[in-house]
Image: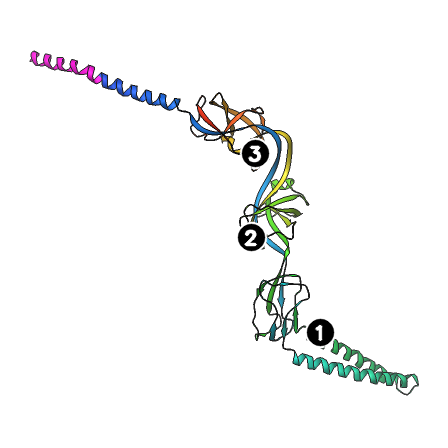
């Protein structure tokens, strides 16, 4: 029995160096891999902190709308005899858009004019007789009232006849045509919609806490997703003095400054309004900043390694962030590839592409 245990003990003691050797080899392999990983520079894109101006911009979205949009309706009943415009046509205020059948109205106007002329001639004869005392004052006054009534009837007949020509109430584009030749219309029925595309606006709603940033005549930059690469000038025409109690916002009316702009009613737009400017201040690209738990950090490049540094920020624009403390002009920063960085990480730096100024 003791002899058997002795054999087992000898076998185990012989195996232990082999097992021990295997474990050390695995550890050495892991340590070597980690060392190799740490010695391999991480590729990053770098840029510089520089001095320049920055404009703080409030961003909002909205839709372009026409300031003037008129519904053209029939002012009398009748059949459409002629349509003179189609959708998309440009028209001037007062231009004839359609004609209605007007023979009945024309006849009525002719009869009213004839009746008025007859009464005027009779009035002239009675005036002479009245001056000679041959016509009683009462008969003369009755005839005078008849002339006045005939005049009113004639004017009404001519007005109704003029309504047979349907005219544009404003200048613009025929955005809708809702009828066809031969349609029978009732009074008040809609024929067209005319939209003035030269007077465009966008309405945005701003939280009441932000209202102090805006005032009438403030410049606005307008961009449309449908027109990439283009920017259009606008301005704030009005800041509503009323705050909507339900939403806590107030309405801003923004007008498009350039009437020849390619913007059209209904387009989705993005608006940027500068509400503050700092000149000659320290700036870094927005993507250089790591923000977490209320702290702002940048990765500063020194001798091909990086160090995380806390900074204090100021104004922000679409491209830039103002740094008020923690950084100096000319220091190099990582702007792309921050993931996985820690103090002392070796990097392979590539210069950032040229950027527009703030």
User: Label 2 near label 3: C-beta < 8 Å?
Assistant: no
Residue at the location (71% across, 79% down)? 109
Q: List x then y, in percent, for residue 7.
A: 10, 13
Mark 1: secondary structure: helix
Cα distance, mark 1 to mark 3? 65 Å
Q: Circle 2 — which element?
A: loop
Based on the displayed image, in which of its 4 quarters is residue 342 positioned?
A: top left
> Measured from the top left, where is residue 228 in percent x and y?
54, 47
Q: Residues within 10 Å of mark 1 (few under 14, many from 20)?
A: few
Secondary structure character of the magenta stretch overall = helix
Pick the quarter of the image with the N terminus.
top left
* Residue that label 1 marks: 159
Q: Is 347 rendered above or below residue 270?
A: above
Q: CA distance from mark 1 to mark 2?
A: 40 Å
Specify the segment rendered in magenta: 1-19
Residue denoted by label 3: 320
Q: Earlier in the sequence, mark 1 or mark 2?
A: 1
Q: Quadrant of residue 85?
A: bottom right
Dot 2 alpha-carbon crowd within 10 angstroms: few under 14, some 14 to 19, many 20 or more: some
Looking at marks 1 and 3 on the same chain, the residue that comes earlier in the sequence is marked by: 1
Task: Identify the residue shown where x is 39% and y is 24%.
Answer: 40
Q: Is residue 300 left or right of residue 140?
A: left
Q: Which residue is mark 2?
A: 267
Q: Is 2 a magenta residue?
A: yes
In the structure shown, which secondary structural element does the residue marked by tag 3 occupy?
A: strand
**Circle 1 or circle 3, nearest the eye:** 3
Q: Do labels 1 and 3 touch, CB within 8 Å? A: no
Q: Residue at x 75, y 81 (%)?
A: 113
Q: What x and y, as percent, mark residue 270?
A: 56, 46
Magenta region includes residue 184: no
Q: Nearer the viewer, mark 1 or mark 2?
A: 2
Of the 4 image quadrants, the one containing the C terminus is top right
């Amino acid at each position: 029995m003791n002899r058997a245990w002795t054999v087992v003990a000898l076998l185990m003691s012989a195996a232990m160096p082999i097992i021990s050797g295997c474990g050390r080899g695995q550890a050495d392999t892991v340590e070597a891999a980690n060392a190799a990983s740490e010695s391999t520079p991480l590729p990053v894109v770098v840029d510089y902190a520089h001095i320049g101006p920055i404009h703080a911009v409030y961003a909002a979205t909205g839709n372009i709308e026409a300031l003037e949009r008129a519904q053209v309706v029939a002012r009398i009943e009748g059949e459409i005899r002629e349509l003179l415009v189609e959708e998309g046509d440009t028209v001037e205020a007062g231009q004839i858009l359609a004609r209605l059948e007007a023979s009945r109205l024309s006849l009525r106007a002719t009869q009213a004019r004839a009746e008025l002329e007859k009464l005027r001639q009779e009035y002239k004869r009675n005036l002479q007789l009245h001056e000679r005392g041959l016509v009683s004052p009462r008969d003369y006054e009755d005839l005078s009232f008849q002339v006045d009534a005939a005049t009113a009837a004639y004017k009404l007949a001519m007005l109704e006849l003029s309504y047979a020509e349907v005219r544009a109430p404003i200048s613009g584009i025929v955005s809708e045509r809702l009828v066809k030749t031969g349609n029978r219309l009732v009074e008040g029925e809609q024929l067209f919609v005319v939209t003035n595309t030269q007077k465009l606006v966008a309405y945005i709603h701003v939280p009441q806490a932000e209202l102090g940033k805006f005032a009438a005549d403030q410049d606005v930059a307008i961009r449309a997703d449908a027109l990439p690469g283009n920017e259009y000038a606008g301005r704030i025409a009005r800041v509503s003095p009323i705050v909507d109690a339900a939403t806590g916002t107030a309405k801003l009316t923004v007008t498009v400054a350039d009437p020849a702009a390619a913007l059209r009613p209904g387009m989705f737009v993005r608006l940027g309004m500068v509400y503050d400017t700092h000149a000659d201040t320290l700036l870094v690209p927005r993507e250089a900043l790591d923000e977490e738990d209320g702290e702002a950090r940048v990765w500063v490049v020194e001798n091909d390694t990086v160090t995380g540094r806390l900074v204090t920020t100021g104004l922000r624009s679409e491209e830039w962030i103002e740094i008020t403390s923690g950084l100096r002009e000319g220091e190099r920063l990582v702007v792309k590839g921050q993931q996985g960085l820690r103090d002392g990480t070796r990097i392979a730096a590539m210069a950032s592409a040229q950027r527009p100024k703030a």
